[in-house]
Image: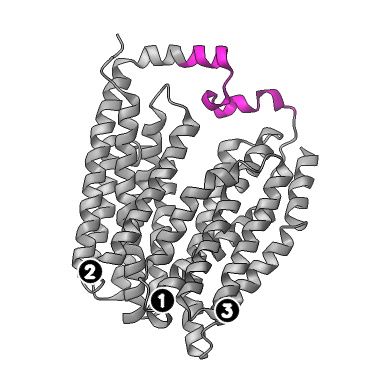
Amino acid sequence: MQNKAFNPVFNSYLIYIGIGLASAGVALYTPIIVSETGKNFSGTWAALILFGLNLGRVVGSFMGGRFPHLANHRFAIAGNILLEGVALYCMAFLYQAWALVLFAVLAGLGSGLSYPGLKNYLLKLKGLEQASLFSRLAFALRIGMVGGYLIAAWVPVDSLKLVFFIVLISFIAYCVFMLYAMRAISRHEAENKDLDNDKQKIQVQDEGDDEYLPSSHYHQASDNLKPVRLPIKFHLSNTLFWCLAVQPMIGFSLHIPKYTPEIAVSTPFWLGALVIIFFQIPVSKRAVRTRDHFRFLQIGYGCLFLSFSLMVIAGQYASVVIASAVLLAFAQVFYGPSYDVVLARFANNSSEDTSRLMSQQMFYQSTGTMIGSLLGGVLFDLAQQVQMPSLNWILLAAGSLWMMTLSKNKIPDLYRNARQQA
């Protein structure tokens, strides 16, 4: 008999609250540790911390895919959450740059293992629309980021132990919320396993809703299509976007204490998060046709170019730094969802598997984030060494202009040629 006391909406919000708290913890420590490491060691070492975090996440995601028991069991998820929180807390007691990078990798490993498990438990909440589940998850992440960046502007940066203690508490709370929700979901799943399977079969037959169809069903009608893949250059364009877009995470954190100390180092980040929260859905609704989404990709690169150009022209003014951060956020607003839509539409009109394409998207995005994090610190150090403070921003602006040009014709042509062969 079905457990009537189980409330999927309530348990989904427990997960959202938990991930929001964790997101706030990450947003709290990231600009502070990058800024402090840049002052005490170098921009390159500061960049290596973010590089290590992203490397750990990629390795964790890979391990979770190869060894599901490390990522999907509720106690494993809780353990991975605590691994991330404890590893971050230990960073408050480390005084060597290499040790900070090592523990950043450990924290990223916990994140990479726990996050897929979180999404797996969300998908077990039957009766809730999957698109709504993940849009609310993204909203919780952004709200948490804003809160974390605002706290970072208030917490004294010279007290890293306090900063990372708050981070640890946020991850413990995240773990508690997740454990409570996962226990309820697991009990409900065990009590209603046969009933849920019957409902899912009926839902697939009666509604024909793609949200509930297995990935193998998407291409049952297209088995005769040739196995066409998007060219590697198309995926590399995504890597290059995120390589460029992530560098201000390092660039602003190192630039602000040196050139615009009148604003808090976290200011560009919480402002950017607010822009994404308020404009993401209204902007995304304006793109309907595939050509609209390609136009949005070009606008995304254009916003990057304008953002970096402002820093070249007048990066010594706080108002310009803030305007640059807002433009950077708009670049993500235009680019991110449109790239996902383009991939999904290619999968729907070819023999390509949607889940495989989305996995590739995450791989190339993570690769771009890792490379961009490292280059951000290296370029900042290079600019200081040659006594040309705007050099890193000049190089970023040039790269954005080049990609904006390619995204007008070259990148859409790669897509269209692959579609024609499908």
In this rendering, does residue 103 appear at all?
Answer: no
In the rendered structure, which amino acid carries the disc numbered 3?
Answer: Val
Q: Work out whether residue 271 or residue 400 is closer to the camera in this orientation and state it.
A: 271
Does 3 sit left or right of 295 as displayed? Answer: left
Q: Distance of mark 3 from mark 1, alpha carbons? A: 14 Å
Q: Work out whether residue 416 or residue 268 is closer to the camera in this orientation and state it.
A: 268
Q: SS at mark 1?
A: helix
* Range shown magenta: 200-224
Asked whether residue 209 is drawn in magenta, I would say yes
Q: Please report the residue visible at 29 percent of the width from the left and 55 percent of the height from the top.
A: 25
Classify 370 as above or below 7. Answer: below
Q: Count residues near mark 1 (Cα–Cα under 10 Å), then give few for <14, some for 14-19, many for 20+.
A: many
Q: Work out whether residue 228 or residue 117 is closer to the camera in this orientation and state it.
A: 117
Classify 13 as above or below 393. Answer: above
- Tags 3 and 1 touching, CB below 8 Å: no
Residue located beneath label 2 in the image: 160
Residue 120's quadrant in the figure? top left
Q: Which mark is residue 189?
A: none
In the rendered structure, which amino acid carries the disc numbered 2?
Answer: Leu
Q: Residue extending furthest bottom? A: 387
Residue located beneath label 3 in the image: 312
Q: Distance of mark 3 from mark 2, alpha carbons? A: 32 Å
Q: Distance of mark 1 from mark 2, alpha carbons? A: 19 Å
- Give how far across and how far down residue 308 sits, in percent: 57, 71
Residue located beneath label 1 in the image: 256
Q: SS at mark 2?
A: helix
Earlier sequence position, callout 3 versus callout 2:
2
In the rendered structure, which amino acid carries the disc numbered 1?
Answer: Ile
